[in-house]
Amino acid sequence: MYDSLTSRYTFACPRRGESRVALSAFRTLEPLLGTTHPVVYQVRFACPCGDEHDSLVSHDELDWAPLGLDGRLFLNLMTSRLEPVASELGDLAAMRIQAGEWPWSFFCYPEERPRPVFPSSFWLLAPGGGSLGLAVRCPACSRISVNLVSHEHVDVPFHNDREIGVVDHVFPEDTHAAVEEFRAELWSASFDARRLALE
Ligand SMILES: [Zn+2]
Ligand SMILES: [Zn+2]
């Protein structure tokens, strides 16, 4: 479902059969209630056909597949062993993370600090004016922040915008109220620029 060469997810489309979209085409992500392990996310995405559709994405596909850690195996003829097909890519990702680089990050407004994050903590995405409004549920304090980022910031692991916009607003815990405020605030709010250095 995720192709790490093109950084695209393949989903069913009722009109086209299937469509390939980047993470930035996602509009909402919600963990599916009732699933335990592995967690499955219900995703609504903007399809190239013009409609939005729902699909399901596993936690692995959200957080690990873009890093090349998708668990496929191949037979290494030199060692006669089964090895992960993407082990080199995955090793590289692991090395970068150990060196303090994060594949994704965001600015937590209630905590007033940048934090590393994985796509499974992304909640709402809305494009506009060449940028992307991104609501993130903080993995540390579990409160919601809204950042204004580039599409690459979301789609390309280890691409972190040097500066991002931060909506100067604390969003409510209640999901429905927060969705309404996200839509209302996003393109009317003033954004403060924050640096995303994860020191
Ligand atoms: Zn479609
Ligand atoms: Zn936080």
Image (spheres, rainbow, N blue to C red):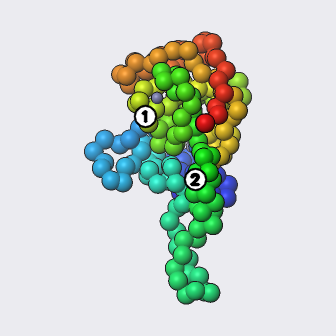
Proximity of marks 2 and 1: CB atoms separated by less than 8 Å: no
Residue 163 appears at what percent x and percent y?
Answer: 69, 28
**Quadrant including the C terminus:** top right
Is residue 41 visible in the rendered structure shown here?
yes
Residue 14 appears at what percent x and percent y?
Answer: 52, 47
Residue 20 appears at what percent x and percent y?
Answer: 61, 50
Q: Is residue 136 above or below residue 185?
A: below
- N-terminal-most mark, 2 or 1: 2
- Label 1 near ligand 2 (CB < 8 Å): yes
Dot 1: element:
loop
Query: Residue type at mark 2?
Result: Gln
Query: Residue type at mark 1?
Result: Ala
Horizontal relation, residue 2 to residue 130: left or right: left
Residue under label 1:
140
Tell me what residue is drawn at x 54 percent, y 71 percent: 84
Residue under label 2:
98
Dot 2: element:
helix
Q: CA distance from mark 2 to mark 1?
A: 19 Å
Is residue 48 visible in the rendered structure shown here?
no
Foreground residue among 34 and 150: 150
Mark nearest the camera among 2 and 1 is: 2
Tell me what residue is drawn at x 62 percent, y 46 percent: 101
Q: Quadrant of residue 131?
A: top right
Instruction: Give neighbour class at mark 1: few <14, some 14-19, many 20+ (Cα, 10 Å).
Output: few
